[in-house]
Image (tube, rainbow, N blue to C red):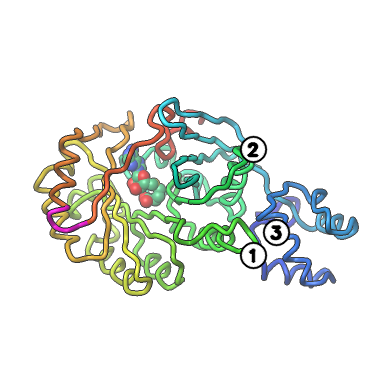
């Protein structure tokens, strides 16, 4: 994104930064110094880059801008300490991110788009339609701002906030590479999970990136008929096509795929549905994450009872499918995707 024709410096990777510096008659090694200031030391101004000469700082100021996001609102859950951030971007766009603290570290859930085009019926991100893709720097800033705010290291990233990451593919891949880079926050690829509603050609492309990040697929149904009732993308790609793409991903990366399955009372949560899902996924390199759906008022979806969820899980386990039930964090602060932003629109 341009700002008074200036270049968004945090959206540039190290090679691109080198190239630009050379084009303005600077030494390429400066790129690494500047990159470290931006992506590891997380400075917000060129002024603060103290080992860069004043004249170069001035040059940088003229040519680039550092994208800023500000905390518009922060809510802390009384139940479990989950923090929900509502951020305002440069052009007043609002996006949200969530911080979850576990014994093994801090996880940030980032948004990749403002709004979403996918139209899943249970998801609040989609209710106000699509606004725009976030730039790489805007996705990075969510993590950087939270790390600055809590003054503690972020160790895990989930791309599970508002938006469909594979619908903003290039910016998202660049985000993963920058946040993973040694000169940046150096968050391990294995500690990064990308969740998609299943845009099949992009799953193949993602497999070919040779990243070690975890791929999560929002499946939410054991067959296409039910999936079409809640997820419009099911009219474009069948579950079979998604599973074929996942198999390719397994083969390329040797990694299992996580299937997310939000249980909605009487729609996809019966024993029959569990059997059907078991048949579909048995003998695949997969993991199922069962999620009690977060009620969204605008839709009439109610979460399944605890008994049903446990029964569902035990049926999958009979198929030897690794299954977990997601602990629901932050339910008192509207921490499901898009829920907070919606209140402020
Ligand atoms: N667009 C991507 C990532 C964003 S959503 C995707 O579809 O995967 C992150 C996860 O939260 C997805 O699995 C999504 O289906 C799920 N989700 C959305 N609304 C929900 C709700 N009300 N309750 C539980 N999970 C929900």
- In the image as oriented, which residue stretches furthest toward the top? 78
Query: Is residue 40 found inside the magenta-colored segment of the image?
Result: no
* Label 2 vs 3, first from the N-terminus: 3
Mark 3 lies on residue: 36
Q: Residue at the spot x=64%, y=37% of the render?
A: 70
How many residues crowd mark 2 within 10 Å: few (<14), some (14–19), many (20+)?
A: some
The stretch of residues the image draws in magenta is 317-321
Quadrant of ligand 1 in image:
top left
| Magenta segment main secondary structure | loop
How many residues crowd mark 1 within 10 Å: few (<14), some (14–19), many (20+)?
A: some
Report which quarter residue 14 is drawn in. bottom right
Mark 2 lies on residue: 70
Q: Is residue 301 above or below residue 188?
A: above
Secondary structure of the residue carrying tag 1 is loop
Secondary structure of the residue carrying tag 3 is helix
**The disc label shown at residue 13, or none:** 1
Quick one: 310 or 85, which is closer to the camera?
Answer: 310
Q: Is residue 332 left or right of residue 322?
A: right
Query: Is residue 320 found inside the magenta-colored segment of the image?
Result: yes
Report which quarter residue 311 is drawn in. top left
Q: Residue at the spot x=15%, y=56% of the render?
A: 278
């Amino acid at each position: 994104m341009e700002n008074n024709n200036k270049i968004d410096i945090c959206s540039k990777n190290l090679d691109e930064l080198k190239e630009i510096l050379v084009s303005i008659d600077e030494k390429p090694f400066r790129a690494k110094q500047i990159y470290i200031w931006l992506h590891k030391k997380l400075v917000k101004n060129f002024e603060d880059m103290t080992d860069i000469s004043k004249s170069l700082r001035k040059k940088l100021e003229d040519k680039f801008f550092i994208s800023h996001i500000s905390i518009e609102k922060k809510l802390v859950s009384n139940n479990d300490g989950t923090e929900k951030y509502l951020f305002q971007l440069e052009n007043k766009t609002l996006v949200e991110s969530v911080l979850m603290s576990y014994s093994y570290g801090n996880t940030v859930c980032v948004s990749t788009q403002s709004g979403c085009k996918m139209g899943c019926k249970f998801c609040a991100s989609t209710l106000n339609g699509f606004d725009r893709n976030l730039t790489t720097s805007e996705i990075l800033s969510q993590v950087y701002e939270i790390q600055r705010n809590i003054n503690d290291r972020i160790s895990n990233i989930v791309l599970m906030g508002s938006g469909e990451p594979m619908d903003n593919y290039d910016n998202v891949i660049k985000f993963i590479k920058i946040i993973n880079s040694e000169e940046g926050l150096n968050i391990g690829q294995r500690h990064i999970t990308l969740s998609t509603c299943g845009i099949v050609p992009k799953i193949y492309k993602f497999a070919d990136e040779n990243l070690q990040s975890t791929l999560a697929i929002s499946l939410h149904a054991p067959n296409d008929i039910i999936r079409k009732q809640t997820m419009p993308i099911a009219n474009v790609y069948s579950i079979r096509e998604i599973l074929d793409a996942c198999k390719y991903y397994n083969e390329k990366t040797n990694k299992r795929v996580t299937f997310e399955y939000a249980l909605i009372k009487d729609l996809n949560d019966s024993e029959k549905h569990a059997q059907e899902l078991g048949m579909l996924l048995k003998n695949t390199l997969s993991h199922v994450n069962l999620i009690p759906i977060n009620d969204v008022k605008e839709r009439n979806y109610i979460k399944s009872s605890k008994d049903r969820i446990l029964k569902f899980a035990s049926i999958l386990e009979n198929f030897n499918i690794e299954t977990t039930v997601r602990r629901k964090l932050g339910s008192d602060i509207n921490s499901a995707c898009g829920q907070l932003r919606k209140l402020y629109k």
